[in-house]
Amino acid sequence: MADMKPLRRRNGNQHLHRESIEYRNAVKRKVHAYHVFIQAGIIAQGLLQYLAVVFPTAAWNAFGSWLRTIRPGIPPSELVVANALRQSLPEFLLDSSSTDAVAKFILERQDPERMQLLRLAS
């Protein structure tokens, strides 16, 4: 929020009750945006953990990189699952774009100038 008044260091309160209603609403909107961002990150991390526990073999197979210690009985980390998803995304989009609604949704909203990821897969 560019219109927010800067605070001096170690000066905690802004005394919002003294500000205009528009300013208070803008502060509320900013705090809400922070909360939504944090919640989206927590949901994404939870999904990565779920995929690591439920589909460990698929995550390890799609990982496509090197780790010093890959232990077969232990689920992969969120980093491994995120890399596996990143590696398998172009193949997923190219193979299932005509049948899968999610792939179709993603492809319709891509900028053709920035589709380097799909160029590498084709």
Image (tube, helix red, strand yellow):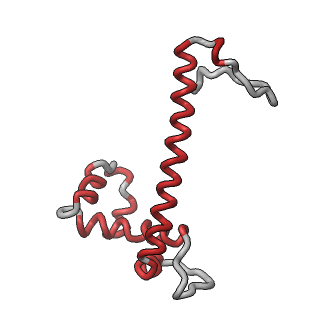
Q: Give how far across and how far down residue 94 sits, in percent.
A: 27, 66
Q: Is residue 120 left or right of residue 43?
A: left
Q: Quadrant of the N terminus?
A: top right
Measured as percent of width and height from the top left, residue 43 is found at 48, 55
Measured along the vertical axis of the image, is residue 113 above or below residue 92? above
Vertical order, 54 against 115 (above or below)? below
Q: Nearer the viewer, residue 41 or 15?
A: 15
In front: 114, or 97? 97
**Extreme bottom residue here?**
72
Residue at 48% over, 73% down: 52
Q: Position of residue 96 (x, y in %)?
A: 23, 66
**Quarter of the rendering occupied by the C terminus:** bottom left
How many numbered circles does the render carry?
Answer: 0
Q: Is residue 67 left or right of residue 90?
A: right
Q: Which quadrant would residue 101 be assigned to in this image? A: bottom left
Q: Which quadrant would residue 55 be assigned to in this image? A: bottom left
